[in-house]
Amino acid sequence: MTTLEVSDLFVRYGKSIVAVQGASFSVKEGEIVSLLGQNGAGKSTVLKTIAGVVSPLSGAVTYGALDLTAKGAARIPAGIAYVPEDRGVFGTLTVGENLRLGAISRKDKAGVDADIEAQLDRFPILRKYWSRGASLLSGGEQQQLAIARALMIRPNLLLLDEPTLGLAPIIVDLIFDVIAQLNAEGMTILLVEQNAVRSIAISHRSYVVQAPGRIIGSGNAEELAANAEVVEYLGFSPLGRPEDKEL
């Protein structure tokens, strides 16, 4: 079983700003795990470290036998895909060109074509706007494109950073439905998300992160609700708020 392990992770920006202080957690194969916390808690920095965007000051990040902190560690061959908070779509390229760019490392043309069809079935708006420039898409449409492009590498582990941030409720529902579908198909997902209640509900396990990147509690809704420090920090009980709650 392939497991992502983050152990005693420290990340610093510049000489003085500590963004993550001693974070440790794991994501087992086939799980959805979410990182919850207020803005500036260090959640996105953890994801960027796993994705190789930033380098840690110390600590270990491993995925199976692969040391992700090692220089030159390759994420895509290892089956890791990352969707950043800013979506990272190429605005000067069309929807179709963005999708094909996601499969640039693949040599199986027939498989790529089949996967494109699968993503267009999953996100029908992308089929409609296949030839449209990505810069002309709405925020929700760009998010669908960003996820679809990440899926073109056929990842085993998908890293999602704030996938519903600023989106209309109907698109939020769509994104959470897609996350559940992907996990049902066997994909492992690490999710950073402001919509705390829905993240807890969809996740096998959630970790609550307090600045600077310190984990103060973990578990399912019942376990989090039993942790007084977590409830005080979140400002609500995971069992006591039926509506969506954003941090």
Image (cartoon, rainbow, N blue to C red):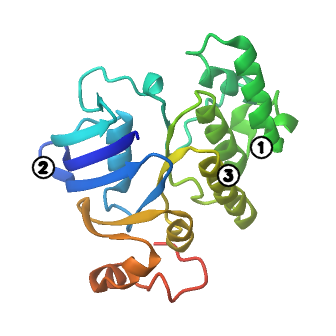
Q: Nearer the viewer, mark 3 or mark 2?
A: 3
Mark drawn on residue 181: 3
Q: Is residue 215 visible?
A: yes
Q: Residue at x 68, y 21 (%)?
A: 100
Tell me what residue is drawn at x 64 percent, y 59 percent. 176
The residue furthest front is: 1
The residue at which mark 1 appears reads as 123
Q: Image check: 58 left or right of 67?
A: left
Q: Is the residue 232 above or below the residue 209 in the image? A: below
The residue sitting at 31% across, 62% down in the picture is 41
Residue at the location (40% across, 83% down)?
225
Q: Identify the mark nearer the N-term, 2 or 1.
A: 2
Tell which circle, 3 or 1, labels the residue nearer the N-terminal end: 1
Q: How far, Cα to Cα, is label 3 from label 2?
A: 42 Å
- Whole-percent x, y for residue 240 in the image: 51, 89
Question: Hey, what amino acid is under mark 1?
Answer: Phe
SS of the residue under disc 3: helix
In the picture, measured across the screen, residue 236 lies left or right of residue 10, that is right
Q: In the picture, residue 167 is in which quadrant?
A: bottom right
Q: Amino acid at mark 3?
A: Gln
Whichever of callouts 3 and 2 sits on the residue coming sooner in the sequence is: 2
Frontmost residue, 57 versus 106: 106
The quarter of the image holding the C terminus is bottom left
Question: Residue lying furthest right in this view?
Answer: 128
Please identify the quadrant where the N terminus is shown.
Answer: top left
Task: For mark 2, give the secondary structure.
Answer: loop
